[in-house]
Amino acid sequence: MIFSDQKILESIETGKIVIEPFDRNALGTNSYDVHLSPYFACYEGNVLDAKSHNQVRHFEIPPEGFTLQPGVLYLGSTQEYTETHNAVPFLEGKSSVGRLGIDIHATAGKGDVGFCNYWTLEISCIMPVKIYLGMPIGQLIYFAVEGDIDNMYHLKKNAKYTEKTPRPMESMMWKNKW
């Protein structure tokens, strides 16, 4: 079951969902619009290694905007810090963004109950497109959870993305043991 606007507001009022900054105008019928932060990163190497800590170069979107290029994986982030304690948050791209040929996540659209952070975006495009700081980039949709939760994400010992930072975080796949 997807949360309605009223259920999202109720969850914000009780502290079970946190969105900072919160703008009532960004609340849709059953979603909340998130916006592009100035913080971006790109991997430095030409070949990424799943067993190595791949280094990134951080930069910021200038006030006049930034042109994304095809064939480049950009890591961006949301302006909004979020916490979700009573639902499974899903981050989906806005249709207006998709119609510009921009994908905002390669595979990681689902968050975990207990996720407390800014969202890192895995951004790619099919043709050059100019983007701007603060533009609506995606929408959070909240799905109800059935049953009690023993292992909230922010309390897991092996959670890899708990460092609170407004900057995008590179892959931590290298921390996995296989």
Image (spheres, grey):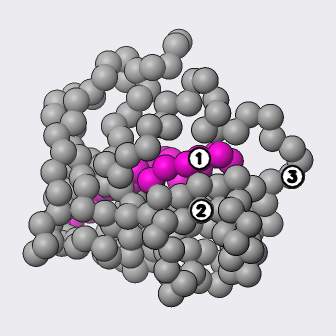
Q: Pointer 2: residues within 10 angstroms few (<14), some, or many (20+)?
A: many
Residue 95 visible: yes
Residue 107 magenta: yes
Q: Earlier in the sequence, mark 1 or mark 2?
A: 2
Q: Earlier in the sequence, mark 2 or mark 3?
A: 2
* Quarter where residue 169 is shown: top left
Question: Disc 3 marks which amino acid?
Answer: Glu
Circle on res. 146: 3
In the rendered image, which quarter contains the N terminus?
bottom right
Question: Disc 1 marks which amino acid?
Answer: Phe
- Judge whether 2 appears above or below 108 on screen: below
Q: Is residue 91 left or right of residue 100?
A: right
**Residue 30 percent location from the top left of the image:** 66, 78
Q: Is residue 153 left or right of residue 44?
A: right
Q: Which residue is mark 1?
A: 115
Question: Disc 2 marks which amino acid?
Answer: Val
Task: Name the residue located 59 percent from the left edge and 47 percent from the top edge.
Answer: 115
Task: Name the residue located 45 percent from the left edge and 77 percent from the top edge.
Answer: 95
Q: Which residue is mark 2?
A: 18
| View extreme (top): residue | 178
Q: Pointer 3: residues within 10 angstroms few (<14), some, or many (20+)?
A: few
